[in-house]
Amino acid sequence: MRIDGKGLIDRTKPVRFRFDGRDYAGYKGDTLASALIANEVKLVARSFKYHRPRGVLTAGSEEPNAMVEVIGAKNQTPNVRATVQEVFEGLVAQSQNRLGSLKYDLLAVNDYLSPFLSAGFYYKTFMWPRAFWEAIYEPIIRRAAGLGSLSGKHDEGIYEKAFAFCDVLVIGAGPAGLMVALTAGRSGADVILAEESHHIGGRLLGDGGVIGGMAAADWVASVLAELTAMPNVRIMLRTAVTGAYDHGTYGALERVGLHKSARPNLPRECFWRIVAGHAVLATGALERSVAFADNDRPGIMMASGVRTYLNRYGVVPGKRVTLFANTDAARGVARDLMAAGVTVAAIIDPREGASAVEDCPVHLGAEVVGTRGRLGLREITVRKGSDEFKIETDCLAVSGGWNPTLHLTCHMNGRPRWNDELAAFVPMEGAVPGLVAVGAANGTFSTHGALATGHAAALRAVQALGRRVSVDLPDAEDAPYRIQPIWQVAGEGRAWLDFANDVTTKDVKLSAQEGFRSVEHMKRYTTQGMAPDQGKNSNVAALAVLADATGRGIAETGVTTFRPPYVPVSIAAMGAGGRGAGFAPQRFLTSDQASRDRGAPMIEAGLWYRPSYFPKPGETTWREACDREVRMVREAVGVADVSTLGKIDIQGKDAGRFLDFVYTNMFSTLPVGRVRYGLMLREDGLVLDDGTSARLGENHYLMTTTTAAAGLVMRHLDFVHQAFCADWQVRFISVTEAWAQFAVAGPKARALLNSVLDEPLGDVPFMAVTTVRVGGVEARLFRISFSGEEGYEIAVPTRFGEALFRDLLARAETMGGGPYGMEALNVLRIEKGFITHAEIHGRITAHDIGMEKMVSAKKDCIGKAAAQRPGLWGPDREQLVGLKAVEAISAGAHLFVPGAEVHREMDQGYVTSVGWSPTLDAWLGLAFLKDGRARIGGRIRLVDHLRGIDVICDVCHPVFHDPEGVKLRA
Amino acid sequence: MRLTCPLCGTRDRREFYYYGDAAYLQRPTVEAPAEAWDNYLHLRDNPAGVTRDLWYHEAGCAQWLVVTRNTVTHEVSAVELVAERRP
């Protein structure tokens, strides 16, 4: 029911929305909960386990009952709290966790079965008979379990992530937070004010009151105007700070588009990482309920919620309201209701000595012991001493006191302290470095206290920042908080603690009785506090009941650990930008478009995309193209883009000395203009990488790394240099992206190059480097080969890469040549016995690949000492061999002695690379075989259980093609 | 988590690559006994308290850093360049 003239909703802007198939109207500024209350919808949900009818309980993000599904064009979002979701034109929501309609939920039968469904019933009930578990019990439980449902479709919504930095982060925009923001803002500091709700003001909006002689709402408006005008203050509405992390980092979730009609390009949510020099926790407090029989009916609400709905949204959830509360502060709810013309049937106050002077009946020393009304509250039963009487009421506002919202102070292992006077836990001081709790979040419950502690904390932060400010503290209410704790009311019937997970006082007592006496055990046994609301308004009451059942005090019982996030955060928001192409950066070659133009499918190599093969008309499989490209290189000429290999430019007087230290072999003796193959070890003696390095000048080398290890090698070189020889005169930098480099290989390679170079090639011996010109552009020409043919690699500055590639291809094609892709490149190198990271996979030593002689005896190098230790060399090692077979073989297969049993203990080695060789007309493989070099010439059985391959292979020397290297040096 | 790079200032830990204990800087000579190399390569303390470890400012200045931090409180008490470390 709406109350005229009340609330911060915009009555000039009506909004139409739909809930459970019916159309309703609300106003801009309403939440779904307030709009439903205005439309007198009481029943909004069914409880998780017993499917009890439930209504709205709170007016905040802690809501355990009113969780709904919001249906969008592309999304279906379950467990949306109706108390947080703002209404907008066209909003469609539906209730969840029901079988049938909300009014006649078929699973409500669980409520009658409740004697059998107590805590731990799974473990007790479904134990027997054993065979029933998988076939019968589990499917039924799975069907009934879970809250809400998903569309089953891909979430196509947009999510964002962002970073922000500030001097002072203010968490919560109630009276305390506003005072901090105002004070710090006026000092000129960079301030972020993060407010979970869609309006600043906090409890001032719900409670009203007077600040500095102004109505609280007017004071909030004036502060808002001032803060908005400050360029150094950023107000982040709809932003819940979800976690406190190391060194002033905070996570926060902003609802960006969830309160608006669908608009393309507007993200649904944004996950923020905020870095703050100082942070002030001004999150206020959460009201807690009281456990009495049937305290979960629609119409029974938190007192603060009723007050917020009245003052902030201009709605009342009933026509005849009663109040059951144990503090003076809660009386304000009744007074506000009466002032708005709503009947307050009675105030029930368990405190004997409290004031009885109100404009309605007050029952002191009384308790609510029972309620009636299946789909909505109709009547309560009150006990006073030995008397029991009934009160007709359709809304019961309950307050059992307040718990400071201290969750963030526990995120780095801080344990809250019990305060007897407040009957509540308060934050441990200094629990999160740089974070200070103020106001109600720190147990200071009056408005004056909130303003004063916020003011003081802000002044300390401002001073620490080296700034000055003077701000007057406005006058405000400073009434004492007088509480007499009441956690549960003795009596018959079930009394709920955790509404979201259907945990009753009986469950907690049973837990204690069955030995689960620790608060952490009780939580897991009963599922107390494990629902989406994480027990925000029930955890403390539950542990008070546990303390009572175990005969310990609350302080001794302690609390469970609050962990991030404070409110549910969608995985989509945390992983924003990481979907599809956003998962990893993509690197493209200068030849990328030219390759795609020729229909080449691209294959990922690290972050790079490289052409797999270049199909010709009539070719139906990749193998046909690959075989043709291999023959083309062996018989004519092929061109491949090899720019992905890492290139590191190394200069300085000690450059050669440095290479001697990181490579196993010598580079300081390499003549200028020559290239050498180098092997690099890790310090533990295993192979890190291999590649060629060229000496371009006396003090100038160019190292190449494999594509896969380019970043790894750069990091390694930086480490070795900075850790062990920082005083050497050597500097190096990655130039991988500065050069486009193309392999030109085959008997006609020289002829092809001569056709593009400005001057024909002179004598360039194998493993030499020289400078050439192509189209007037200076280029580097390396005579190296990864194919076994006469081969060159020509490197030009990246901007000329595409032009040179296209030119080389066009000319090659007139000579019976053309481009070749990764598949052919792989076959060519297997034929030649060249290794890649398929072979040097991190468990391989120089000895294993037959390169032990490359570890120079004349000098120390990284990995030398460890490479010599027993176990890294000798006949027990698996050594690189070639395999040859007539039938198809596979990488990943394992090797066995023919005739021997095929099982793990008999394993002789494994296959790392295979390919069909058109050159040798056979399947070839590279493998690691125990004592392999001594077994060359023998036979071995290759078994791949996964692919059903079982083939006898010849064990060969790994170099199949041109073993003498005649072609290479032609 | 934030680290203060001596060259770049305070940065998010995503800019850094974590390597391991700073003991890795105490490289034995090539002639050192096998035990010394075993200790250097494989044996590490796992302290509850102050530890020194190696981080690489990979998305920044490419400097290796020795970070002194407390594994219990997460406090970072010092960051120095490996190349300019105290002996």
Image: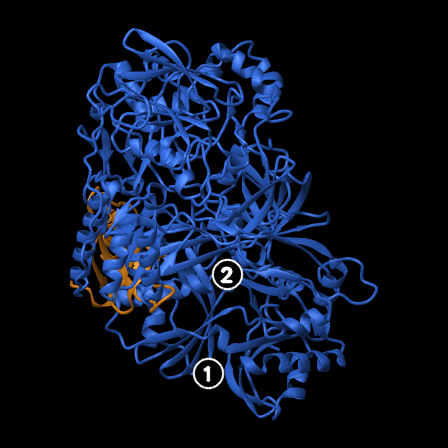
Question: What residue does disc 2 label?
Answer: A708
Which is more toward the observer, A547 or A790?
Answer: A547
Give the mark nearer the N terminus: 2 vs 1.
Answer: 1
Q: Secondary structure at mark 2?
A: loop
Given the image, what chain letter belongs to the residue carrying mark 1? A
Quarter placement of the C terminus of chain A: bottom right
Along the viewing direction, whichever of A947 and A694 lies nearer the viewer: A947
Query: Is residue B70 visible to us here?
Result: no
To the question of a shared chain for discs 2 and 1, the answer is: yes
Q: Disc 2 residue type?
A: Ala
Q: Position of residue A519 (x, y in %)?
A: 30, 24
Which x, y percent locates residue A360? 33, 25
Q: Which chain is orange?
A: B
Q: Which mark lies nearer to you, 2 or 1? A: 2
Q: Determine the secondary structure under disc 1.
A: loop
Q: Is residue A891 left or right of residue A518?
A: right
Residue drawn at (67%, 79%) of the image: A806
| Residue assigned mark 1 | A673
In the picture, one chain is blue; tell me its letter.
A
Q: Is residue A950 left or right of residue A844?
A: right
Spatial separation of the CA atoms under disc 2 and disc 1: 27 Å
Q: Position of residue A916 (x, y in %)?
A: 70, 56
- State the residue lying farthest toward the right: A618
